[in-house]
Image: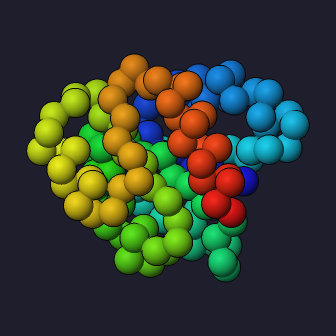
Amino acid sequence: MKILIVDDERDVELLFRQKFRKEVRSGLLELAFAFSGDEALKLLDSEHPPQVVYVFSDINMPGMTGLELLNKIKTQFPSICVSMISAYGDTENYKKAMESGAKEFFTKPIDFDSLRKEISRIISQE
């Protein structure tokens, strides 16, 4: 299963590669990274159909916000599951994300056990 992590903070890539090292080595997961909403859409657009089945996106990014990205992904690629992450557990962003079709909403610091469970649920639906 290929997942795309979208975050403007580049150190997130190292964190995810460490946390999911076992799953990547075993071939269970393939990780892709984008550091902006535009970059994420270009990556999704580059494969027809996209191989990515799950997008994990930060909400607060310069340029296109995670919520704007969520709306575009749900419009262009409705079968892709999208979860959002925010440093702030504010109810307004949570409500907007869920109303726009987000599968889940996480707050920083990321609870990787919960994220693993979410990914396992998506894999079992594939």
Residue 96 picture location, percent across and down = 19, 54
Q: On the picture, is 89 further left or further right than 32?
A: left
Q: On the picture, is 77 further left or further right than 31?
A: left
Q: Tell me what residue is drawn at x 64 percent, y 60 percent.
A: 125
Q: Quadrant of residue 86?
A: top left
Q: Quadrant of residue 118?
A: top right
Residue 69 picture location, percent across and down = 35, 60
Instruction: Report whether residue 103 is seen.
Output: yes
Q: Tell me what residue is drawn at x 74 percent, y 44 percent.
A: 29
Q: Tell me what residue is drawn at x 57 percent, y 36 percent.
A: 117
Residue 52 picture location, percent across and down = 63, 61
Q: In the rendered view, tell whether residue 93 sits above or below residue 110.
A: below
Q: In the rendered view, tell whether residue 59 sits above or below residue 11.
A: below
Please identify the quadrant where the C terminus is shown: bottom right
Q: Tell me what residue is drawn at x 69 percent, y 29 percent.
A: 20
Q: In the rendered view, tell whether residue 48 sits above or below residue 70.
A: below
Q: In the rendered view, tell whether residue 68 sits above or below residue 78.
A: above
Query: In the depicted view, which residue is nearer to us: 106 or 34?
Result: 106
Query: In the depicted view, which residue is nearer to us: 21 or 14?
Result: 21
Color style of the picture:
rainbow
Query: In the depicted view, which residue is nearer to us: 35 or 21?
Result: 21
